Amino acid sequence: MNTIKECFNAILNGDKEKSRQAAREVRKLLYSSSANNRDIYKEISILIDTAPENYIRVFEDWRQENFVMAISVIYFLRNRENDPDFLFPWLFHLLQHQNGYIRHAAVKMICHEIGPLTYHIRFPNDKSDLNKFSPEQGDNILYSLFVNLNELSRVLWQPKYRRYKYIDSLPASPYKSVQMILFELENSCGKKYMDRIAYF
C-alpha cells in the first residue's frame, strides 16, 4: 500500500488481517517524507468528509474499529472551514459503541475540536488564522456540544457510577467517555464560561 487512499480501500474491503495492517499503515504513510504534497491533503479531506457514510456500510466490529482508528489518525487535517461541527452526530454515535478503541478514537476526535472552538475564550484579544468561523459560531457549537454531552451523560448514567469519585476511576464505558470530554470542555472553557452556558 503506497497511499492513504489505498489503505482505506484495504480497511474497508480487505480480509481481517489485511484490514488491520492497513489501519496501522495510515500513520506511517501520513508521517513519511513522501506525504508532503497537496494531493494527500485533498485525499484526506475527502476520506474524512465521507467517513460517516462509509462507516454505515461496515458491519464487522473489527472493520469498524480499524476504520475509526485510521480516521482518528488523519482527523486533525480535516477542512473545518464550512461546518466545523458536521461530524459531531457521527462522533456522538461512536461514543456509545461497545468497543473501547472506537470510543477512545471518538473522544480523541471531539477533544481535538475543542481547542479551535475555545480559542476565542482562551485568547479573547487574538484572532486565530486557522479558524474560519466567528466567535459567535464557536459559542453556538460549544453550547450545543455541552447540551448534547449532558443529555447523553444522563441517558448513560447508572447508579453504580455513584461510588466513583474521579473520572479516571470509572469503569471503561460510554459514560466514562462522555465524562472525559465534558472534563476537557470545562478545562478549555474555564469555569466562568461553563457556568454561563449551563444557565443559557
Image (cartoon, helix red, strand yellow):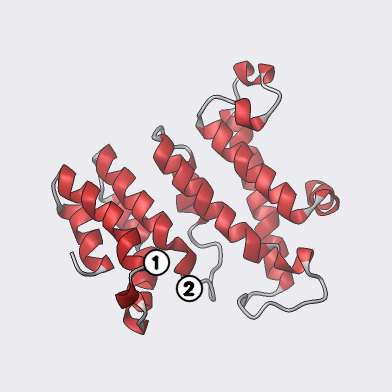
Question: Residue 49 has which mark?
Answer: 1
Residue at figure coordinates x 17%, y 44% from the top left: 17
Instruction: Give the crowd class for mark 1: few <14, some 14-19, many >=20 residues within 10 Å.
Output: some
Residue found at the far left of this picture:
15
Tell me, yes or no, whether the two marked residues, 2 and 1, touch with CB atoms within 8 Å.
yes
Q: Say what secondary structure mark 1 lies in.
A: helix
> Quick check: can you spot residue 152?
yes
Q: The disc labelled 2 sits on which kind of residue? A: Asn
Q: Position of residue 161 (x, y in %)?
A: 63, 21
Front residue of this view, candidates 112 and 142: 112
Residue 168's place in the image compared with 164, above or below, is below
Q: Position of residue 62 (x, y in %)?
A: 26, 40
Question: Residue 79 has which mark?
Answer: 2
Residue at figure coordinates x 58%, y 60% from the top left: 113
Circle nearer the viewer, 2 or 1: 2
Residue found at the far front of this picture:
33
- Residue 33 as seen in the image, left or right of residue 139: left
Residue 173's place in the image compared with 180, above or below, is above
| Earlier sequence position, callout 2 versus callout 1 | 1
Residue 8's place in the image compared with 199, above or below, is below
